[in-house]
Image (spheres, coloured by chain):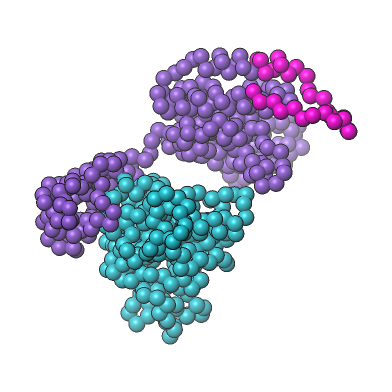
Chain colours: A cyan, B purple
Amino acid sequence: MPDIRLLSEGIFEITKDKKQLATLNLDPGKVVYGEKLISIEGTEYRTWDPRRSKLGAMVLKKFNVPLRKDSKVLYLGAASGTTVSHVSDIVSEGAVYAVEFAPRSMRDFIGLASRRKNIFPILADAGKPDSYAHIVEPVDLIFQDVAQPNQAEIAARNAARFLNKGGYLLLSIKARSIDTAASPKEIFKEEVKKLEQAFEPRFEILAARDLMPYHEDHLGVLAKLRSEPLQGVNLYKE
Amino acid sequence: MKINTWFGGIEVGSSGEILASDPFPKDVRELALRSLSLRGSRENLPPECFDLKAAALECGFVASLSEYYSLLHEVTLEAAKLQVSEALTPDQRIVQAVEALDDINETTNSLSERLFEWYGGYFPESGLNGEALALFIVKYGSRENVPPDDPLYLKARDSMGAKLEAADEALLKGFAESVCGLYSRRKQIEAYIESSMEALAPNLTMIAGPMLGARLISIAGSLEKLASFPSSTIQVIGASKALFKHLRARAPSPKHGVIYSHPLINTSPWWVRGKVARALAAKLSLAARIDFYSAEKNPSLAGELEEKVRKIRAANPKPPQKRQEGGAKPKKKRRK
């Protein structure tokens, strides 16, 4: 009998031979990207590979993932939907607005999105939130994995438009997509500083950890909107 | 304040109450098309954190939240499908063709080598390889079938090769047929690229030739991306390894990437290749931009480039002298 432990709402750790991350399968019987299905007492779980998912890695790196079953999520950088499928499992009664820029990835993603009613696929540039402002409602979490040099700015623009007060931002920063030559540590410092100060709205960083050993040169960041303006610091005009 | 949403236009009062609404017809395809047409609009955007679903309920577009979500699901899906099907533009077809050509070249080379080794055991004196060898095997099979009027007749008769048994002969013939098929596929793809490059990017084709032009588009990803690259990037497209080595460590910067295959560069003496590459890349980026934004052929481009290259060669007739040890000759920085 596999041992099962709840890590966070909708996220489980199943011990069967070895410890594995898993979510409840919203689309029973279907495998999305080659993950394993495990049935326990009539309930089907899908294992979640942290090496293929930044969010999965963040869970194992003890990030407090602010997702509930009715959460509304704006997911920037959906790619072919590996991680989106798990988010869709977790927010079974919520909504995932999944933005992806590449038509090629969207082609793979559409099959998944059509099978899961809580996924809303949007083919658009995450750097231009105005282009999907007529579709996306205010959300509780923005998850961003876009590998763009202006990641912090993209996060701020989307948060300004779509993030509820008290909402969270989960961000995966890929050092190599910001500067191929500089040292990742320096880049991470810079990016965190940008999130805190460079754009409106500003963020308060709750946690920032690298995603080793699951992803090399990636930093995971959990942040929320800063409630009051910074005192005495005016780096940029409003 | 007027707001555009995926389900229609609404008029909102100062405290967020809905004054008037003009919902779109409740048809998935219609809604998807309207949603796509709203993408580029900067006017009447919903204010920050505007609750679209509450508005849709209030103005009576949907009766329940579950209806809102299931309709939005259908509409976003339909819109995404429409966008995906529009994404296969003529330049994307060329990108696929270039990549198919690379795959075919790689496969053909290794299969040809295999055929050469294999058939070599039976007729090592043939002196044939590649497509000629494959055609020979398809035609005759065993060297015993070479007729007296064939130039290889004597060699075939006196060959030291082993006797080719019927079963092996059938196998080799079949294998050679596959190789011949690949060679003709290669010609077909090359012809396709040549004709479609002439239609899609006449200026780029004029400067670079169809194959190099297609390769540049393929590596850039699309004609639009190629048109947006600075010429310094076009100059080193395909030399990313050398470029990043240069940026990270103290390696010399690459002079040229795939544009090296251009006759203006590879027939130039080595000491002007960097300069020629720069001039060529400048014209290539101009050509790509004309092709993407206006698509009119500008015949003067080729002449300008030739003139420029002629000047470069005339100004640098001799290889540069190696600087002598200790000679405190100031480093010349030439920028032109």
**Residue A34, quarter of the rendered image:** bottom left
Q: Is residue A85 left or right of residue B104?
A: left
Q: Residue furthest bottom?
A: A1
Q: Is residue A25 shown to the viewer in this render? A: no
Where is B142 relative to A7, above or below?
Answer: above
Asked if the magenta segment contains residue B333, the reply would be: yes
Query: x%, y% of residue A195?
Result: 46, 57
Determine the residue positioned at 42% across, 49% down.
Answer: A237
Q: Is residue A178 shown to the viewer in this render? A: yes
**Residue B332, quarter of the rendered image:** top right
Query: x%, y% of residue B227?
Result: 47, 31
* Front position in the image: B282 or B240: B282
Query: x%, y% of residue B52?
Result: 22, 56
Where is B3 relative to B230, above or below?
Answer: below
Name the quadrant of the N terminus of chain A. bottom left
Instruction: Specify start and end residues of the magenta stretch as a single range.
Output: B310-336
